[in-house]
Image (cartoon, rainbow, N blue to C red):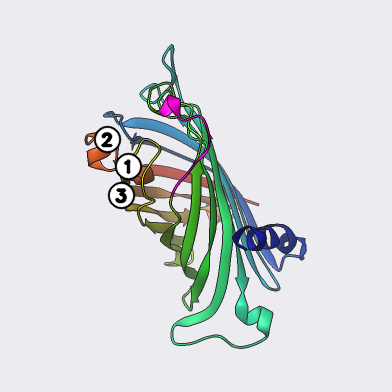
């Protein structure tokens, strides 16, 4: 049932004509990224493509990030160039009020929906070589605020097939499936003024059980927030075309790795960044 609903939302919904859409290219960079088991601070350049749109019965969100690390997060044992990663996120939210034709607003909630989607990634780092696949499904509340604020409580079905150089990871020969586990997630875009907005997401993820090598994973927190300035008017462009800002990510127990698993190395990241976006 989980897979059937995911296919229905992910394939049929986008054929409807969009009532609104926003697509952007972004670049962000920082010098305080961390990776589990790595004691060093890592510099990364991240290029992103993001698309959000709404149609008669709901909304779509798609994002792909291409991440390039410096030599402190190497791609192999024999070269000093940094690892490369691609991370894809897709979410589709069906608005139950729009589908039923009923007003589902109550209190500060303007709407109720069902969100489905997936995460997909690949990375060529020396230690783990992640090949994550994850399905997402659960209810969503859409709050009555300026801009938007959505909260969802979803179930996650996650698996991985790492192929890193170090045992015992290198001995994992097939795709490993974690325990199905819940995530409370929030996403927002709140205007502070005509040109300044506060944007981001927060994920609070329960333990996904035992990992590939028999260790108990921990609950995970990933908060990524941005203060963005619309500078389009300064260069004679249409409003909301060019944005500049500061981003900060706090990620604890990254990918479910705890201090006990990693011996205190790289499980907690506090990463300030500068960010630029072009919307079209």
For disc 1, the marked residue is 257
Tags 3 and 1 in contact by the CB under 8 Å rule? yes
In this rendering, position of residue 161 left or right of residue 10:
left
Q: Residue at x 33, y 47 (%)?
A: 251
Q: Toward the viewer: 247 or 170?
A: 170
For label 2, the crowd category at 10 Å Cα-Cα, with few meaning under 14, some 14 to 19 and many 20 or more, is: some
Q: Which residues are magenta?
A: 169-178
Closer to the N terminus: mark 2 or mark 3? 3
For label 3, the crowd category at 10 Å Cα-Cα, with few meaning under 14, some 14 to 19 and many 20 or more, is: many
Position of residue 139 measured from the top left corner of the image (x, y, whole percent): 51, 71
Position of residue 260 measured from the top left corner of the image (x, y, whole percent): 22, 40
Q: Toward the viewer: 193 or 50?
A: 50
Farthest top residue? 78
Tags 2 and 1 in contact by the CB under 8 Å rule? yes
Against 121, is 171 above or below?
Answer: above
> What SS does tag 2 mark?
helix
Can you see residue 86?
Answer: no
């Amino acid at each position: 049932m989980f897979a059937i609903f995911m296919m229905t939302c992910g394939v049929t919904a986008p054929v409807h004509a969009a009532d609104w859409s926003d697509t952007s290219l972004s670049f962000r960079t920082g010098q305080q990224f961390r990776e589990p088991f790595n004691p060093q601070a890592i510099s990364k350049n991240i290029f992103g493509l993001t698309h959000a749109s709404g149609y008669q019965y709901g909304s779509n969100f798609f994002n792909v990030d291409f991440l390039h690390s410096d030599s402190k997060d190497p791609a192999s044992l024999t070269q000093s160039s940094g690892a490369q990663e691609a991370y894809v996120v897709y979410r589709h939210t069906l608005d139950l009020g729009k589908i039923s034709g009923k007003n589902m607003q109550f209190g500060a909630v303007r709407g109720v929906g069902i969100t489905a989607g997936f995460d997909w990634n690949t990375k060529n780092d020396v230690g783990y070589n992640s090949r994550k696949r994850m399905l997402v499904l659960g209810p969503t509340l859409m709050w009555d605020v300026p801009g938007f604020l959505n909260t969802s409580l979803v179930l996650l079905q996650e698996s991985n097939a790492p192929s890193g150089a170090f045992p015992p990871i290198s001995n994992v020969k097939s795709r490993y499936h974690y325990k199905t586990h819940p995530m409370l997630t929030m996403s927002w875009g709140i205007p502070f003024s005509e040109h300044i907005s506060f944007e981001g997401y927060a994920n609070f993820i329960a333990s996904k059980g035992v990992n590939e090598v028999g260790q108990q994973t921990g609950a995970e927190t990933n908060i990524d927030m941005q203060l963005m300035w619309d500078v389009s008017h300064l260069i004679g462009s249409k409003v909301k075309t060019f944005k500049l800002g500061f981003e900060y990510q706090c990620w604890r127990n990254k990918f479910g790795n705890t201090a006990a698993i990693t011996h205190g190395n790289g499980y907690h990241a506090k990463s300030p960044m500068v960010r630029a976006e072009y919307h079209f």
